[in-house]
Image: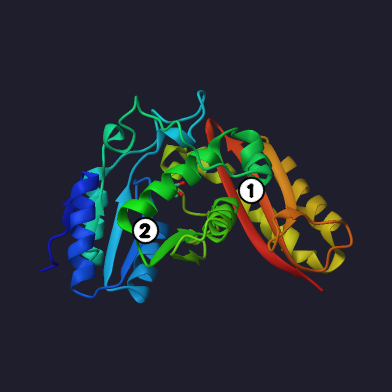
Amino acid sequence: MPEPIQSLTTVDDARAFVAAERAAGRRIALVPTMGALHEGHLELVRTAREHADTVVASVFVNPMQFGANEDLDRYPRTPETDTAQLIVLGAEALFMPEVEEMYPDGGRSETLVTAGRLGGVLEGSSRPGHFDGVLTVVTKLLSIITPDVAVFGEKDAQQLFLVRRMVRDLNLPVRIIGVPTVREPDGLALSSRNRLLRPAERTDALALSRALEAAGAVAAEGVQAMLAAARAVLEREPGVELDYLAVVDPATFLFAPDDHRGPAQVLVAARVGSVRLIDNAVFAIA
Ligand code: PAF
């Protein structure tokens, strides 16, 4: 029988749980999520287990990272199955606060952790304020749980870059671990939003991972060839409305110049029906 999970809904309870774990000499890992857990999240939990004695997952659909016209209300919420999956994986605790617990002043925080200029490009350009909302809630979660390590998925590449930079800039005492994207056998990157896709849209959505593959196939020819190959795949798919396609240097997240050599991260965001999806992959330009 799996061990029962400690279900935490208040900041005080979470702090008390963590204090007891620390007093027992245990290392703590945090896996921050917005729930609707899928195999990609479960991989984060498994990775967290490799680095800590106590795994705390958080499930919180953070209103501060959603814009006014975004999908906050229809973002999938599956608390019972999330809890059951975390129990099976043996996570020790689940922190699942209400919005009022995290943001007692009317559902938002006046104090923000801002992502700076890089928070305003790519995802940040399409979703103004998104990364300030992400960094603010991640800072709160790190401050509440005080983990030794925190685990994030590489699918949200810009988020992972900005979280790492924030931790470095603010000297936060936590190690950030990135976990490779988990994909369906046909290449679709796992995402909580995939469950909002209709069957035909699910097929259309494969254009994103195929575009990345196409870019990778011509990496030897450089940045412009990669962009052209990926764009050609996306443009062939009428059900896919491209938001952005870019190649960045993963070390800086700056747009890669045409003569870029070394690791090159291809990033794509597109709307498939009413669902906005992102994906990315890193290739080497020799
Ligand atoms: O990646 C996510 O699910 C969210 O952006 C995060 C990191 C849990 C913050 O709300």
167 left or right of 72 in image: right
**Residue 236 appearing in the image:** no
Image-quadrant location for residue 214: bottom right
Q: Which mark is residue 103?
A: none
* Residue sitting farthest toward the left: 1
Residue at (85% x, 54% y) in the render: 224
Expressed as whole percent of the image width and height from the top left, the position of residue 241 reads 66, 34
Q: Which mark is residue 31?
A: 2
* Residue sitting farthest toward the right: 259
Q: Earlier in the sequence, mark 2 or mark 1?
A: 2
Expressed as whole percent of the image width and height from the top left, the position of residue 234 reads 70, 44
Q: Nearer the viewer, residue 271 or 186?
A: 271
Say what secondary structure mark 2 lies in. Answer: strand
**Residue 62 appearing in the image:** yes
Decide: is 132 above or below 92: above
Q: For label 2, count other residues whose C-alpha is less than 10 Å away and answer few (under 14), some (14-19) or many (20+).
A: many
Q: Quadrant of the C terminus?
A: bottom right
- Return the residue at label 1: 207
